[in-house]
Amino acid sequence: MPRSVVPAEAVRLMRDEGAVLVDVRESDEHALRRIPGARNLPLSRLEQVALAVTPGTTVLFHCRTGARTEANGPRLLARVPGCHVCVIEGGLDAWHAAGLPVVEEEGRPIDLARQGQIAVGSLLILGEVLGLLVSPWFHLIVVMVGAFLVFGGVTGQVGVVQVLRQMPWNRRFLSVLSARA
C-alpha cells in the first residue's frame, strides 16, 4: 500500500525532492477546485492514460477526502512502477484546512457527484412520501431509482451525471472552463 503523508509533508516532498502531485478526481471536479500544479489523472481513466514520471520519483496522489486514493492504493502503485508512491491523508479537504493554496473557480456549482447524490436522494424521498400519502403506485419511483443505481454500478455509466452535465447551470460553467483550456 502507498504511504500516507499529511499535507505539510507533501509540500516538503514537492519542494525538496521534486515530488509529482496527481489528482485522481474526475476532470470536472479538478477543474472546479484543485491544488496548483497538480496533474489530473482520473481513476476512471487510470489504466488508459500513461503517467510520465522518472523511476525513483516520489508521486503524491490525492482526491477530495483521501478515501478514493486509499481505496485504490494497489492500482496507483501499479501505474508508476519504480516510484515512491504516497497518498495525501485527508486529500484536498485536508490540504485546504491546513491553509495551503487551492484554486477555486468563481461561481462554480456543486460538483456533479454531489449534485447526483442530492437528485437521487430527493427522488427517493419524493417517491416514498407520495407513495404513502397519495398512491402506492408512487413507490415505483423508488424501485426505478434503485434499478437506475444498480445499472450505473454494473456498467459504470452513471446516467444521472450525464443528465446533470446538461443542466443550464453546469453547461454554462463547464463551457467557460473549456474555453479557458
Image (cartoon, grey):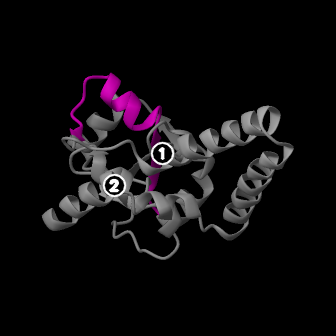
- Give yes or no for residue 106 being in the magenta stretch: no
Q: Mark 2–mark 1 contact, CB under 8 Å?
A: yes
Taking the spot 52% from the left edge, 41% from the top edge, the residue there is 3
Is residue 150 at least partly visible in the picture? yes
User: In the rendered image, which residue does mark 2 sit on?
Assistant: 170
- Relative to the observer, which residue lies in front, 162 or 65? 162
Q: Quadrant of residue 119?
A: top right
Image quadrant holding the C terminus, namely: bottom left
Measuring 34% from the left and 59% from the top, which residue is drawn there?
40
| Lateral position of residue 82 relative to residue 22, left or right | right
Q: Residue at x 53, y 48 (%)?
A: 116
| In the foreground, 126 or 151 | 126
Distance (Cα) linking label 2 and label 1? 10 Å
As displayed, is residue 29 above or below residue 89? Answer: below
Q: Position of residue 177 (x, y in %)?
A: 21, 59
**Picture quadrant of residue 172:** bottom left
Q: Residue at x 71, y 53 (%)?
A: 145
Inspect this view and state whether residue 58 appears: no
Crowd around label 1: few <14 · some 14–19 · many ≥20 (10 Å)? some
Q: Where residue 161 sits in the image (x, y, percent)?
A: 50, 58
Give the image location of residue 19, x and y in percent: 30, 49
Q: Residue furthest left?
A: 180
State the extent of the magenta-drawn residues as a range: 81-103
Q: State the mark number for residue 115.
A: 1
Q: Amino acid at mark 2?
A: Asn
